[in-house]
Amino acid sequence: MATRYFTKETFDFLTDLEANNNRPWFNENKARYDAAIKEPALDFIEDFATPLAKISKHFVADPSLQGGSLFRIYRDTRFGKDKTPYKTNTGVHFRHFMAKNAHAPGFYLHIQPGENFMGVGLWRPETKVAYDIRQHIDEHQAEWKKATRGKRFTDVYSLQGESLTRPPRGFDEDHPLIADLKRKDFIASTRLSQRTVTSADFMKSFEDNCKRAVPLMKFLCDAVGVPF
C-alpha cells in the first residue's frame, strides 16, 4: 500500500520557520519539526533503501541522524553574513558509498515551500575530476548525448549549473559539445509540485525519476572511476 510521507504540515512548519527563524521559536516547536519533517524524512529514507538498491547497489539510503542521508536543519553560520540558525528547507541526499573518499554523483531531494525539486549528478567537482569528466565526454560523445538528450531523460530533467566563460584547457571553441565541456557542474534537476511531494505515490514517482537519470549517473560514475 502506498505511504504518504510528507504532508501539508511539512510545508506549514517550513513556512512558519522562515517567519520565525530563531532558537526560542524552534525550541518551542521542536515537536512539530520532529513530527512533520524529521520522522517522515527518515521513514522515506529507510523505505527507499530497497528501491534504491534495485537501481544501484552502490548508493546509500542511511536513516542515521549523524552523517546519514538527511541533512541537518541547523545552518553553519560561522562564515556567512546570514546568521539565521536554521535552514528553511529539508534536504535528502542518497550518496554514492565512496562519496567520502572520492568525488561521486548522487541523488538529491529538496523540499521547500515553492522550491521543491529533485537533483542528480555531481556538483562542482574539483579541477582534476572536472577534467576527467570532460575527457570522458569528449571520448564518449554519443553516450553522453544519449544520457543527456534522450527523451526519457529530457521529459523530466534539464541540465543545470554554472559554466566556464572560456573553453577549458585542451578543448577548442568549435568542439561540437563545447557547451557541455564548459560546465563546472554536471547536474540535472526537475521541479516538483507540493501536490506531488505530499502524494501517497511520491515514493514511486521519486523512484521513477531516479531510474530516468540512470544513464547520466552511470556515465558520471564511469568518468570519475567509481562503480555504478
Image: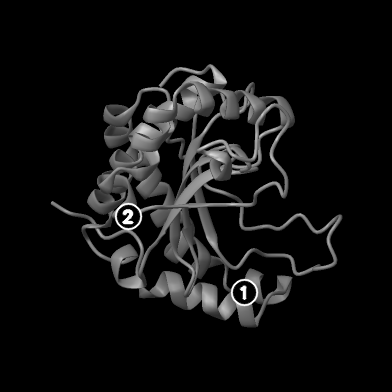
Count of number-bearing discs: 2
162 or 82: which is nearer to us?
162
Q: Secondary structure at mark 2?
A: loop
Labels 1, 2: front one = 2
Residue 144 percent location from the top left of the image: 42, 32
Q: Is residue 149 above or below residue 109?
A: above
At 43% across and 27% down in the image, what residue appears?
Answer: 219
Residue 63 percent location from the top left of the image: 46, 40
Q: Mark 1 to mark 2: distance in Å?
A: 40 Å
Type of colouring: one colour
- Going by the numbered disc 1, the residue's amino acid type is Glu
Residue 202 percent location from the top left of the image: 27, 57
At 31% across and 48% down in the image, what residue appears?
Answer: 209
- Using the image, tell me which numbered label, if any, was put on residue 156: 2
The residue indicated by pointer 1 is 28
- Using the image, tell me which numbered label, if any, was put on residue 72: none
Place residue 87 in its image quadrant: bottom right
Residue 174 percent location from the top left of the image: 59, 39
Place residue 17 in its image quadrant: bottom right
At 13% across and 51% down in the image, what residue appears?
Answer: 1
Q: Secondary structure at mark 1?
A: helix
At 51% across and 38% down in the image, what residue appears?
Answer: 177
Q: Residue furthest front?
A: 174
| Mark 1 in CB contact with mark 2 (< 8 angstroms) | no
Place residue 74 in its image quadrant: bottom right
Q: Is residue 157 above or below residue 145?
A: below
Q: Is residue 98 above or below residue 6?
A: above
- Going by the numbered disc 2, the residue's amino acid type is Val
